[in-house]
Image (cartoon, grey):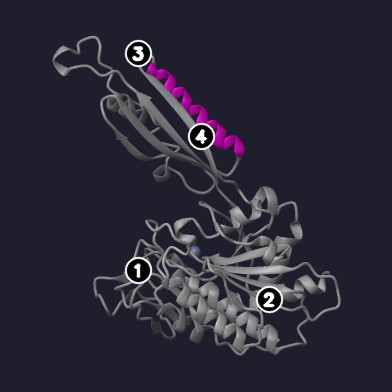
C-alpha cells in the first residue's frame, strides 16, 4: 500500500479552529463555533469525493465511503470528536513542530514557564527521531481529538485514491460536545447504519482499548432536625455535621481516585452542600465490574447506617443513578472487532497492546446503544493541558491502521 501522508497538514489546519465546548450551554452543539469546523470537514470530504458528507442541525458530520467489494462486509464506522476541552483555552492555537526530536524536555516558545518534561511524559522516550507537534504553551493543542479527525480524513482520502484496496461500506462520524459528556446525545444510529464502530481517540501508538469503567452516580440526602441554637440541647441534629461524618468515614487508604490505579475502582465524593436542616452529598462510583460497583455502594450504605445510629430523629436517603457501563460486556460478544483492529495495528508496523480506560468514552455509550465501539489510538498525549503533544509519525501510523482495518474486514468477510 502506498501512503502519501497529508495527515499533519490537515491536523495543523484543524487545530487553529477554536471548537471548545461549553458545559453551561444548553444548546446542541453547546457552542456554535464547532459547526464552523464541521462545515470545513464536509467541504474537504466532498472535495475528495465523499458525495453524501453533510453537517446535521445538531452539529454532527455524517459521511459514507461506498463499498468497492462485492462481498457482504459489515459496515464499519470511524468516529472522532470535534470539540476541545473546556478546561484549557483552545482559541488562537499556534502549533509548533519540533523536527527530529532529541529526547530533551521541550520548552514552549509562547510561555517559557511551560515545558513538556520527560519526567511527566515517559512516552516521549519512544519519540526520539520523530517530529513532535505542540502548542506554543499559551493554549492546549487540540490533538484530543483533532488528531483522530485528521487521521480519519486522511485514511478516507487514501481509500478513495486507491480503488485496489477493497473494503465494505465505511461510515465516518464526527461528533460535537464529547468533552462535556454529550457526544452521542443526538447521534442518529439508524441514519448512520453501521454494524461496528471505532473511536480514534486513544493515547499511545499501538494501543486499543476495549474496556471502560462502569459508572454510577450516588446522591445522599440528609434531613436533620433544626432548633433555635439557644435552646437546641438534646434536640438539634445537624445535617451538615451528619454529612461531614459520612465523608470522614470513607476509606482513607483505598477506594479513592488518589489511592487507586489500574483495575481498581473508587467511591468518590464530588459535591457537598447543605444547611442545618438538609444536606446533600453527591458521589461518583467507578469500577470495571458490576460486582465492584455494588460492593462500593453497599459500603456507602453501611457507612450511612452506622452514622445515622447517632441521629435517631433524622433521615437519610441514598439514590443510585446508573451512568454508563463497561463496553467490554458488549464488545466481547464480537471478538472479531478487536481481533481485526489488533491485526491492523500489526500491519501498520506497531505492536498491538490491549488496554482499559479509567473513564468512559463515547464508545461506552454507543456500545450500549447497539453499536459496539472500542477505542483505537490517535497518538494524543497530555490532553486538556497546555503541554499537549502528538507526533507526526504516530498520526501516520494511525492512518495506516485505519486503512488496513477497512481492508481486513473485507478480506475476512
Ligand atoms: Zn477525546
Distance from Cα at disc 1 to Cα at disc 2 = 41 Å
Rendered view: 139 above or below 234: below
The earlier-in-sequence mark between 2 and 4 is: 2
Percent position of residue 403, x then y: 68, 78
Dot 2 corresponds to which residue? Answer: 64
Distance from Cα at disc 2 to Cα at disc 4 = 40 Å
Dot 1 corresponds to which residue? Answer: 117
Q: Looking at the figure, which quarter contains the N terminus?
A: bottom right
Dot 3 corresponds to which residue? Answer: 313
> In the displayed structure, does residue 100 sit left or right of residue 289?
left
Q: Residue furthest left?
A: 230
Distance from Cα at disc 3 to Cα at disc 4 = 24 Å
Between label 1 and label 3, give the one nearer the viewer. 3
> In the displayed structure, does residue 385 sit left or right of residue 263?
left
Q: Quadrant of residue 23?
A: bottom left
**Other residues around mark 4 within 10 Å, as few (<14) / some (14–19) / many (≥20):** some
Rendered view: 313 above or below 171: above
Between label 2 and label 4, give the one nearer the viewer. 2
Q: The magenta stretch spans which residues?
A: 290-308
Name the magenta segment's main secondary structure.
helix
Amino acid at each position: 500500500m502506498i501512503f502519501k501522508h497529508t495527515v499533519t497538514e490537515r491536523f495543523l489546519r484543524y487545530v487553529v479552529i477554536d471548537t471548545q465546548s461549553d458545559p453551561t450551554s444548553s444548546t446542541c452543539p453547546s457552542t456554535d463555533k464547532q459547526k464552523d469546523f464541521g462545515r470545513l470537514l464536509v467541504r474537504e470530504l466532498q472535495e475528495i469525493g465523499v458525495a453524501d458528507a453533510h453537517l446535521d442541525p445538531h452539529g454532527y458530520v455524517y459521511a459514507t465511503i461506498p463499498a468497492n467489494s462485492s462481498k457482504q462486509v459489515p459496515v464499519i464506522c470511524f468516529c472522532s470528536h470535534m470539540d476541545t476541552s473546556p478546561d484549557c483555552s483552545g482559541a488562537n492555537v499556534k502549533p509548533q513542530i519540533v523536527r527530529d526530536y532529541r529526547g530533551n524536555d521541550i520548552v514552549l516558545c509562547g510561555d517559557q514557564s511551560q515545558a513538556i518534561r520527560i519526567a511527566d511524559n515517559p512516552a516521549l522516550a519512544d519519540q526520539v527521531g520523530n517530529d513532535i507537534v505542540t502548542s506554543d504553551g499559551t493554549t492546549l493543542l487540540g490533538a484530543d481529538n483533532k488528531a483522530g479527525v485528521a487521521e480519519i480524513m486522511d485514511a478516507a482520502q487514501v481509500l478513495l485514491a486507491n480503488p485496489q484496496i477493497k473494503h465494505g461500506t465505511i461510515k465516518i462520524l464526527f461528533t460535537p460536545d464529547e468533552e462535556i459528556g454529550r457526544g452521542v446525545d443526538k447521534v442518529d444510529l439508524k441514519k448512520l447504519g453501521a454494524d461496528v464502530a471505532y473511536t480514534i481517540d486513544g493515547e499511545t501508538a499501538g494501543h486499543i482499548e476495549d474496556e471502560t469503567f462502569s459508572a454510577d452516580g450516588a446522591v445522599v440526602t440528609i434531613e436533620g432536625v433544626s432548633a433555635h441554637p439557644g435552646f437546641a440541647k438534646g434536640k438539634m441534629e445537624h445535617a451538615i455535621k451528619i454529612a461531614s461524618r459520612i465523608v470522614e468515614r470513607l476509606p482513607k487508604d483505598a477506594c479513592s481516585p488518589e489511592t487507586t490505579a489500574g483495575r481498581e475502582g473508587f467511591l468518590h465524593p464530588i459535591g457537598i452542600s447543605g444547611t442545618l436542616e438538609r444536606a446533600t452529598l453527591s458521589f461518583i462510583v467507578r469500577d470495571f465490574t458490576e460486582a465492584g460497583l455494588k460492593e462500593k455502594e453497599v459500603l456507602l450504605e453501611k457507612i450511612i447506617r452506622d452514622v445515622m445510629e447517632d441521629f435517631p430523629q433524622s433521615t437519610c436517603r441514598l439514590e443510585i443513578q446508573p451512568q454508563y457501563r463497561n463496553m467490554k460486556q458488549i464488545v466481547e460478544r464480537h471478538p472479531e472487532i478487536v481481533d481485526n483492529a489488533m491485526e491492523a495495528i500489526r500491519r501498520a508496523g506497531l505492536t498491538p497492546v490491549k488496554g482499559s480506560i479509567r473513564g468512559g468514552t463515547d464508545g461506552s455509550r454507543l456500545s450500549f446503544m447497539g453499536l459496539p465501539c472500542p477505542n483505537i489510538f490517535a497518538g494524543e498525549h497530555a490532553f486538556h493541558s497546555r503541554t499537549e503533544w502528538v507526533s507526526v509519525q504516530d498520526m501516520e501510523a494511525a492512518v495506516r491502521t485505519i486503512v488496513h482495518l477497512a481492508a481486513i474486514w473485507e478480506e475476512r468477510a
